[in-house]
Image: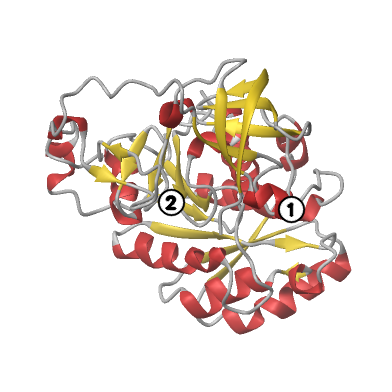
């Protein structure tokens, strides 16, 4: 459950879109690194008393090494400018029935300027959609798309398997201007557009953001239990189904590694094998990059052989992708490993982006 702490803000540290890092002094003389989302709690200043949820930090779980600011109790932010109960402010509740549930304007609500556009929207019209297990694949997929289609408009759909606030991601902040926009779906929030479901989010990416390609992945901080079914990335398979249901073209980015110390993630991760092999009921194009080390390539082929009947296995050349990855506007890191430490992981993600780019109609 929650491990509560109170403290006093000593200093403001790094800041990026939607998030502010703080140094907080605790009453016992120790300090904590904390993260505040000003859109939720207001903007803390040095000297402010803050209420913290420190549980995940104290347990060493995946919150990026932060306690999270729950409130600045002595200086609460004002109410939003809309009058109480004004539905024009939106009535889409996310992180529902938690103490910090935000109430937002959904992209397809009646008060939304996009309502009429989405009222009858029901088709992605062949939109290529790359589905990935981890948030860390996002910049690599984007690099692969833009390597061959530099003018392509790319939308990102952040699902709720990891961090709910899009603001937590420094990667997203660094990709500002390189994406057509971010749609936060399900319980996730803080994107350029808010959607109640992945289906609505996909339609918004196509019709509102006018995306040529979309990428679907959970936010940072995915959950895994080391069991076949107990991981948040199982939703990748459901994403394939959603894309196909709406007339899109699912492109599966495989989680491939020969550097992960956990055997279940070596070769093709069991996450990919379960999500695509058991959960995805629609056909996807699963991308295998050329240029893998021979031993890894053999292991990948063997792992994917049982999936070949239900999906299309696509081999994609990787010439030029190393340079594209190194030119990424944000750093590449997965589980603490950079490009040189886990090249196969990022190469597989970039190859899926390259394949999606080649599915676009000639310009």
> What whole-number distance in Å separates the C-alpha atoms at marks 2 and 1?
38 Å
173 versus 47 height, above or below: below
**Percent position of residue 7, x then y:** 63, 30
Residue at which label 1 appears: 60
Dividing the picture into quarters, in which one does residue 19 lie?
top right
Horizontally, is 118 left or right of 167 in the view?
A: left
Query: How crowded is the residue under tag 2: few (<14 C-alpha within 10 Å), some, or many (20+)?
Result: many
Residue at the location (51% across, 80% down)?
A: 278
Horizontally, is 114 left or right of 363 in the view?
A: left
Residue 12 is at least partly visible in this image: no
Residue at the location (70% across, 69% down)?
A: 269
Q: Any mark on residue 128, and which?
A: 2
**Percent position of residue 107, x then y:** 25, 39
343 versus 109 height, above or below: below
Horizontally, is 251 left or right of 347 in the view?
A: left
Q: Image quadrant for the C terminus? A: top left
Q: Secondary structure at mark 1?
A: loop
Q: Secondary structure at mark 2?
A: strand
Residue at the location (54% across, 72% down)?
A: 275
Dividing the picture into quarters, in which one does residue 223 lie?
bottom right
Q: How is the image coloured?
A: secondary structure
Instruction: Name the residue at the top extreme.
Output: 46
């Amino acid at each position: 459950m929650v491990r509560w702490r109170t403290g006093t803000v000593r200093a403001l540290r790094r800041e990026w879109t939607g998030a502010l890092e703080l140094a907080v002094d605790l009453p016992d003389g120790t300090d904590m690194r904390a993260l505040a989302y000003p859109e939720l709690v207001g903007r803390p200043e040095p000297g402010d008393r803050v209420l913290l949820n420190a549980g995940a930090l104290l347990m060493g779980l995946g919150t990026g090494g932060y306690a999270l600011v729950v409130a600045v109790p002595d200086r609460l932010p004002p109410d939003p400018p809309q009058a109480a109960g004004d539905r024009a402010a939106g009535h889409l509740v996310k992180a529902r029935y938690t103490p910090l549930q935000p109430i937002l304007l959904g992209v397809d609500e009646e008060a939304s300027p996009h309502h009429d556009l989405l009222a009858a929207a029901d088709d992605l019209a062949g939109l290529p959609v790359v589905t990935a297990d981890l948030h860390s694949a996002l910049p690599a997929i984007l690099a692969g798309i833009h390597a061959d289609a530099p003018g392509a408009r790319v939308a990102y759909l952040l699902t709720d398997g990891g961090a709910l606030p899009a603001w937590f991601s420094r990667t997203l902040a660094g990709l500002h201007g390189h994406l057509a926009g971010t749609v936060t779906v399900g319980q996730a929030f803080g994107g350029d557009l808010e959607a109640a479901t992945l289906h609505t989010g996909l339609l918004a990416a196509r019709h509102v953001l006018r995306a040529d390609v979309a990428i679907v992945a959970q936010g940072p901080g995915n959950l895994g239990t080391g069991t076949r079914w107990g991981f948040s990335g199982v939703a990748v398979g459901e994403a394939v189904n959603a894309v196909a249901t709406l007339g899109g073209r699912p492109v599966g980015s495989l989680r491939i590694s020969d550097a992960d110390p956990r055997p279940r993630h070596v070769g093709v991760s069991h996450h990919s094998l379960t999500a695509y092999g058991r959960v995805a009921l629609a056909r996807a194009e699963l991308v295998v990059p050329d240029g893998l080390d021979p031993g890894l390539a053999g292991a990948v082929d063997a792992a994917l052989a049982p999936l070949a009947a239900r999906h299309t296995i696509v081999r994609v050349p990787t010439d030029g992708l190393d340079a594209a990855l190194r030119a990424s506007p944000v750093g590449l890191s997965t589980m603490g490993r950079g490009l040189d430490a886990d090249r196969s992981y990022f190469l597989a993600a970039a190859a899926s982006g390259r394949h999606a780019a080649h599915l676009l109609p000639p310009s």
